[in-house]
Amino acid sequence: MPDRPETQQSLSDILKDLAHHEEPQISVAQLVDRFGGRALGGLLLIFGLACTLPLPPGGTTIFGFPLLLLAPQLVIGARHPWLPAKVRRGAIATADLQKGLPRVLPWIERVEAVSRPRFSFLFVGVGERLIGLVCFLLAVVLILPIPLGNILPAAAVSLLSLALVQRDGLLALFGYALTAVSVSVLVLAGSLLTRGFHQLLGLFSQG
């Protein structure tokens, strides 16, 4: 994935265009075409952002599944996303984009204003593959039915994919830091739940 040319349309402009899509739905294939050479990072960002939204039960599983397909392609060094025909024909409701994108666009525009290609070693060879591996592991968490367990992992995927599109290593470092926080919170929550479960079993055994 080459460095972003100055003449290339900014990510925020692409997202604005998507939010004003005239059809009731936009297919995954259309998203791939719209992002062009940045399709891998762009799709990771779209589905990562979708998972940060307050979704009904099972929502993060639906949006997390494409992440499971896309992230490993970074690991193997793919330049362009491959998706099964069924997934490419899948669509996102324009109404959902119009609801979610305005919430994140101001933040993306602020990031773009200060972002620039730097720490390029984080995006070549092992560096880019590591981003893919981390996004894959976070996607595994996202498809699990963990109440309120989607926000931090989805935000980490979004930040790492934004770093990938912008080629900004500083953003990638923030993404790794957020990943560490996500893992810590999930481990702590799991530990508390396990302890509570054992205490509950103890109460029943005493009775």
Image (cartoon, rainbow, N blue to C red):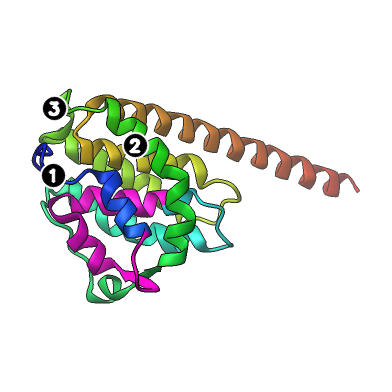
Give the residue at mark 1.
8
Q: SS class of the residue under badge 3?
A: helix
Residue 141 visible from this viewpoint = no
Give the residue at mark 3.
120
Q: How many marks?
A: 3
Residue 117 shown in magenta: no
- The reply, left or right, for residue 21 in relation to residue 190 is left
- Which mark sits nearer the N-terminus, 2 or 1? 1
Q: Which residues are magenta?
A: 20-49
Q: Position of residue 185 (x, y in %)?
A: 54, 33
Between residue 127 and residue 166, name the one nearer to us: 166
Residue 38 shown in magenta: yes
Between residue 196 and residue 164, name the one nearer to us: 164
Residue 109's tag is 2
Query: Could you tell me how far apart the alpha carbons at marks 3 and 2 are, in whole angstroms?
Result: 21 Å
Q: Residues within 10 Å of mark 2 (few under 14, many from 20)?
A: some
Q: Amino acid at mark 2?
A: Glu
Q: Amino acid at mark 1?
A: Gln
- The reply, left or right, for residue 129 in relation to residue 108 is left
Query: Could you tell me how far apart the alpha carbons at marks 1 and 3 are, in whole angstroms?
Result: 19 Å
Q: Amino acid at mark 3?
A: Ser
Q: Position of residue 101 (x, y in %)?
A: 42, 51
Q: Position of residue 157 (x, y in %)?
A: 36, 43
Q: Quadrant of residue 36?
A: bottom left
Residue 151 visible from this viewpoint = yes
Q: SS class of the residue under badge 2?
A: helix
